[in-house]
């Protein structure tokens, strides 16, 4: 079996690549990544140890994609994935995220490849999610689970728009060219080899800042740190992708919500407590009260459908996630310094 993973030197792509390589004996995996993300070059070294080859060019470049080998599956993990970046770098986000998916779809048509697309929970209406703000005041009520029935109408950020438009384009291509696909709408993913930033990959950033006793800020929603997200460990995502490939002949053309779910739902304050506990460090937080128009107060995933179809569920708890990141950072502390700024 031959698999191409786009964005394969990123956090998600590289971990899925190595996980699949360990699970299957008879598998060839290539990645396509222009190495633009901080830390991508470190991930490339990890991939090379597993005999995974990277094609280092831009996903916008279809003439190069066209000349790549044929693959049974393309797992599309390539994106400019930071919501805040999509406010200012609109051309880049549009081209990488939407034109990128378009190019991958053309390649799927040419080679009759199947497609697994990594979408996002940010495809939903910001206005609707903002109304869930009241949840923040009712101490830790995390019972409202979000699935595909929540409205995707209205503004969702340029990032969310490009991912949602990619989903729609995939469905059109499936209808017109019989491309078989799975779309996974993922909530926050975390784990080792994530080079987090405040607006993307916040869990790993939180652990790093605590480990190195650096200052941080609670931003938005009054600066109280009450925002809630559910977090899924990258190993649980990788296991799901493994199952999706294994069962693909019978189960395809699916749109699935995937996340850590209610048991892995956590506020920033609670995450701070976990980081304090594991590092034994107490750091200073400044407060920035005003809220970005792209921020949402709450997201917790309803995994019901994906659990039923694949007899899968997230295994790793929030404590496991924080511990795995902490151990990774401790073991690689020097090497990682330049990647967390
Ligand atoms: N990390 C999360 O919490 C999360 C949550 C939901 C969905 N997702 C989705 O999962 C996928 C992977 O996210 P990630 O966290 O691994 O992000 P990442 O930034 O770590 O990885 C993306 C990779 O794509 C590469 N890339 C960016 N622009 C490119 C271009 N124009 N051409 C070629 N390569 C390019 C980068 O170098 C990087 O290695 C994305 O599609 C994202 O939307 C991520």
Image: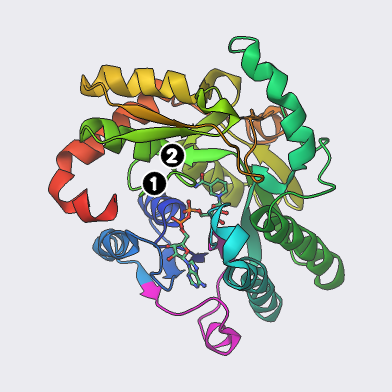
Tag 1–tag 2 contact (CB < 8 Å):
yes
**56 part of magenta stretch:** yes
**271 part of magenta stretch:** no
Compared to residue 111, the image places residue 97 above or below, namely: above
Disc 2 on helix, strand or loop? helix
Name the residue tied to disc 2.
202
Classify mark 2 as within 8 Å of ligand 1 or not, answering yes or no: no
In space, the residues marked 1 and 2 are separated at their CA atoms by: 5 Å
Q: What is the residue that sits farthest to the top in this orientation?
A: 139
Please tell me which residue lies in front, 90 or 318. Answer: 90
Disc 1 on helix, strand or loop? loop
Q: Residues within 10 Å of mark 2 (few under 14, many from 20)?
A: some
Q: Quadrant of residue 41?
A: bottom left
Can the viewer see residue 125?
yes
Instruction: Identify the residue shown where x is 27% and y is 30%.
Output: 210
* Mark earlier in primary sequence (1, 2): 1
Q: State the colouring used for the structure image.
A: rainbow
Classify mark 1 as within 8 Å of ligand 1 or not, answering yes or no: no
Instruction: Identify the residue shown where x is 55% and y is 18%.
Output: 263
Q: Range of the magenta residues?
A: 54-78
Q: Quadrant of residue 74?
A: bottom right
23 left or right of 78? left
Please tell me which residue lies in front, 287 or 189. Answer: 287
Number of numbered labels in the structure image: 2
Q: Position of residue 267 (x, y in %)?
A: 51, 23
Instruction: Identify the residue shown where x is 61% and y is 72%.
Output: 100
Compared to residue 24, the image places residue 175 above or below, namely: below
Name the residue tied to disc 1.
196
């Amino acid at each position: 079996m031959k698999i191409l993973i786009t964005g394969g030197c990123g956090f998600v792509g590289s971990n899925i690549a190595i996980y699949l390589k360990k699970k299957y004996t008879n598998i060839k995996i290539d990645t396509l990544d222009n190495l633009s993300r901080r830390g991508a070059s470190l991930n490339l070294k990890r991939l090379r140890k597993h005999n995974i080859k990277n094609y280092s060019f831009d996903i916008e470049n279809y003439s190069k994609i066209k000349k790549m080998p044929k693959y049974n599956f393309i797992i599309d993990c390539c994106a400019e994935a930071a919501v805040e970046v999509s406010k200012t770098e609109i051309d880049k986000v549009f081209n990488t995220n939407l034109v990128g998916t378009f190019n991958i779809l053309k390649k799927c048509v040419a080679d009759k490849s199947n497609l697994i697309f990594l979408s996002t929970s940010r495809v939903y209406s910001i206005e609707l999610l903002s109304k869930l703000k009241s949840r923040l005041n009712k101490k830790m009520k995390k019972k409202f689970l979000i699935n595909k029935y929540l409205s995707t109408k209205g503004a969702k950020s340029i990032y969310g728009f490009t991912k949602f438009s990619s989903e729609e384009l995939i469905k059109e291509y499936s209808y017109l060219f019989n491309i078989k696909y799975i779309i996974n709408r993922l909530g926050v993913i975390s784990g080792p080899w994530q080079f987090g930033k405040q607006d993307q990959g916040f869990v790993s950033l939180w652990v790093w800042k605590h480990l190195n006793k650096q200052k941080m800020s609670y931003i938005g929603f009054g600066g109280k740190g009450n925002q809630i997200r559910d977090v899924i460990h990258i190993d649980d995502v990788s296991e799901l992708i493994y199952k999706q490939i294994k069962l693909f002949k019978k189960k395809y053309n699916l749109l699935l919500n995937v996340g850590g779910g209610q048991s892995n739902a956590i506020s920033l304050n609670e995450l701070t407590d976990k980081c304090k506990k594991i590092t034994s460090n107490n750091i200073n937080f400044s407060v920035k009260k005003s809220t970005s128009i792209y921020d949402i107060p709450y997201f917790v995933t309803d995994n019901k459908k994906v659990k039923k179809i694949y007899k899968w569920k997230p295994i790793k708890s929030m404590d496991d996630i924080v511990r795995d990141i902490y151990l990774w950072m401790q073991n690689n502390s020097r090497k990682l310094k330049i990647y967390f700024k």
